[in-house]
Amino acid sequence: MSDRGSEASDADLLAAHVDGDHEAFGVLFGRHRDRLWAVALRTLGDPEDAADALQDAMVSAFRRASSWRGEAAVTTWLHRIVVNACLDRVRHERIRTADPLPDDLETRLRTPERAPVDPAAVAEAHARRDLVLDALASLPAEQRAALVLVDMEGYSVADAATILDCAVGTVKSRCARGRSRLAPLLGVLRETGDTPDPGNPPADVDVPSTAPSRAPPADGTVQPA
Amino acid sequence: MSDDLTPAQTEAVRRALRAARHEAPLPDAVAARLDDRLAELVNETFGGEPAAYSTVVPIDRFRRRNRRMTLLVAAAAATVIGVGGTQWLQHTSDSHSLQTADRAEATAPSPSSLAGADAGAHDLDNTFDNLSGTTSGLVQLRLTPEQRAYLAHHDITQVRPIRPVLASAKSLNNVRTDSVPHAQVDTDGPTGELYAAAAAVCRTDLPPDLPVDTRLFRGLLRSKPVILVLRPEDGATLVAAYPCDGGAPTTLPLD
């Protein structure tokens, strides 16, 4: 790898790749693949699916590099391809069998713990994270992707709209709906003690029916059929 | 809708999501897989470097195989090449390759020195790893997942082998003369190949006394390109990362 790799901009590297530089794409993708992996992993929830999606996205980006026109940052373009690959995978439930990952992938995927000071605190943090991820997995894929980009990865709503190829208002709406669905699952409503009015009558109030009763007569007689 | 949540509740949800952000780097197993696929893509798109391995492949092993097996070899080689990054093997069954290999046979190591006289398709991957060393010896150029993980733990990533046999002696012009006097570099010998291979990657300050069984890799140390020198010492393997922009190496015990 040349020194150029550490100095060239993303756009320069993409242009060099299109021009036939054998190494440029590898340098470019290497810069961003950790974050792209994070997005894929959180969007799909499953490491093997995320690995497949990331690989699909890499192939797509490699082949479609000339389609990048500079309207958005290269990293935004890459994220867009990765998110599309993830959403495609969710929509079609497409599981490829090529390049199976090692049987012990789960073990390998675990990040080595760095000398936890308080094991109880670490365990609690992990439990909390698992709760969030489980709740996130219950959302529709589009809401999940929007929340991963905006709330987890810190993208602006405008950038997330570019990545998701939709209107800014759509991203806001997806995020809002997603947060609203997550709140009770995460116990946020209990924690804040500020339950919003759900708009339904209290459960202990009888609501009389206007339809004729289908119950047997009160005197126990049976009507002929 | 978020209208249902108070600002405090919205912020609490966002805070919980932020805390669940995935911070760990790409797992080594996935990274290796992506590297392999990228190498295939590069090869498919830009083509390989011509007959690069012909000087070390003992061709008589392949003569015993039919065309189908040859294709399997090419497929397995493509996988190995992925680990190799930018160095490629184009092994075909055409006459030119055979002629080149015929010439190589005279200098190639004896096939009998390889484990297994007739490796099946299932272990061709390993066979090629063993074949792809220097002309003077068989040097394993694949790191184990544990070694890759160890290096990654020390911020050394994107590690790919450098195959000395593929380097041009002209690359010696890139070797800094202050660190490696030309008099100490035998451009025709295996040691010269090591320096030439490293110099083909970047200008670097390698020590002048690399043993011939040194394994060279390239990679990134905290995102800065480095040449990795793996050499045995006192029964262990040391890895030294030499920055491409000069400076002192970072040395670690690998085993």
Image (cartoon, coloured by chain):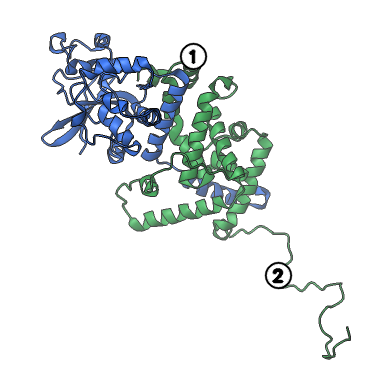
Chain colours: A green, B blue
The N terminus of chain A sits in image quarter: top left
- Is tag 1's residue or tag 2's residue first in the polypeptide sequence? 1
**Residue A123 seen anywhere in this rendered image of the structure:** yes
**Is residue B253 rendered to the left or right of residue B84?**
left
Q: Position of residue B56 (x, y in %)?
A: 25, 22
Q: Secondary structure at mark 1?
A: loop
Residue A203 in the figure: left or right of residue A27: right
Q: Position of residue B161 (x, y in %)?
A: 30, 27
Mark 1 against mark 2, which lies toward the viewer? Answer: 1
In front of the other: B99 or B238: B99
The chain carrying label 2 is: A
Residue B206's disc is: none
Q: Quadrant of residue B231?
A: top left
Question: Residue B254: where, in percent of width, then height?
Answer: 21, 36
Pointer 2 residue:
A203
- Above or below — where is B34 with respect to B162? below
The quadrant the C terminus of chain A occupies is bottom right
Labels 1 and 2 positioned on one and the same chain: yes
Is A61 or A195 nearer to us in this picture?
A61
Position of A177 relative to B207 (above/below): below
Name the chain letter of the residue that bears numbered label 1. A
- What amino acid is found at the position of numbered circle 1 in the picture? Asp
Q: Residue at x 21, y 32 (%)?
A: B114
Mark number, residue A19: 1
Q: Residues within 10 Å of mark 1 (few under 14, many from 20)?
A: few
Q: How many marks?
A: 2
Verify CB contact (< 8 Å) between mark 1 and mark 2: no
Q: Amino acid at mark 2?
A: Ala
Whether residue B202 is visible here, answered yes or no, is no
Q: Position of residue A214 (x, y in %)?
A: 83, 78
Q: Secondary structure at mark 2?
A: loop
